[in-house]
Amino acid sequence: MADVAAHITGTVWKIEVKVGDTVDAGTTLVILESMKMEMPVEAEEGGTVKEIRCKEAQAVNEGDVLVVLG
């Protein structure tokens, strides 16, 4: 299992995947909005989306786990 965490503090603008999706390394999982800029959060390794631990419009802090890959 691999936790994918927010690399900045911001707001979840869009969730690009759903539970059960298979993703490759580099796939955008979530897009965060911070200071009027969109920042993609990408998978560091391939896997299957096991959990999504955020919702759109939710405020998140740097280091918060957004997605769990298995």
Image (cartoon, rainbow, N blue to C red):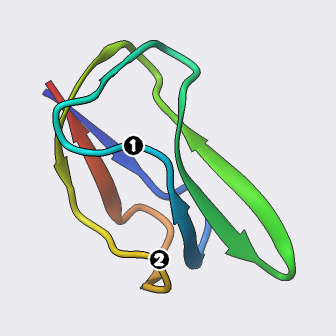
In which quadrant of the rendered view does residue 8 lie? bottom right
Which quadrant does the C terminus fall into? Answer: top left
Looking at the image, residue 40 sits to the left or right of residue 42; the answer is right
Q: CA distance from mark 2 to mark 1?
A: 20 Å
Q: Residue at x 19, y 42 (%)?
A: 19
Element under label 1?
A: loop
Judging by the rendered image, the residue that carries numbered circle 2 is 61
Amino acid at the residue labelled 2: Asn
Give the vertical position of 25 relative to 18 (above or below): above
Question: As rendered, which of 18 and 10 lies closer to the eye?
Answer: 18
Q: Which badge, 2 or 1, is on the more N-terminal residue?
A: 1
Q: Residue at x 50, y 67 (%)?
A: 62
Q: Residue at x 66, y 48 (%)?
A: 40
Q: Residue at x 41, y 61 (%)?
A: 63
Question: As rendered, which of 40 and 64 lies closer to the eye?
Answer: 40
Element under label 2?
A: loop
Question: As rendered, which of 35 and 56 lies closer to the eye?
Answer: 56
Task: Point out which mark residue 49 bears.
Answer: none
In which quadrant of the rendered view does residue 18 lie? top left
Judging by the rendered image, the residue that carries numbered circle 1 is 17
Which quadrant does the N terminus fall into? Answer: top left
Q: Position of residue 29 (x, y in %)?
A: 48, 42
In which quadrant of the rendered view does residue 3 lie? top left
Depth-wise, is mark 2 or mark 1 nearer the camera?
1
Q: Position of residue 17 (x, y in %)?
A: 39, 43
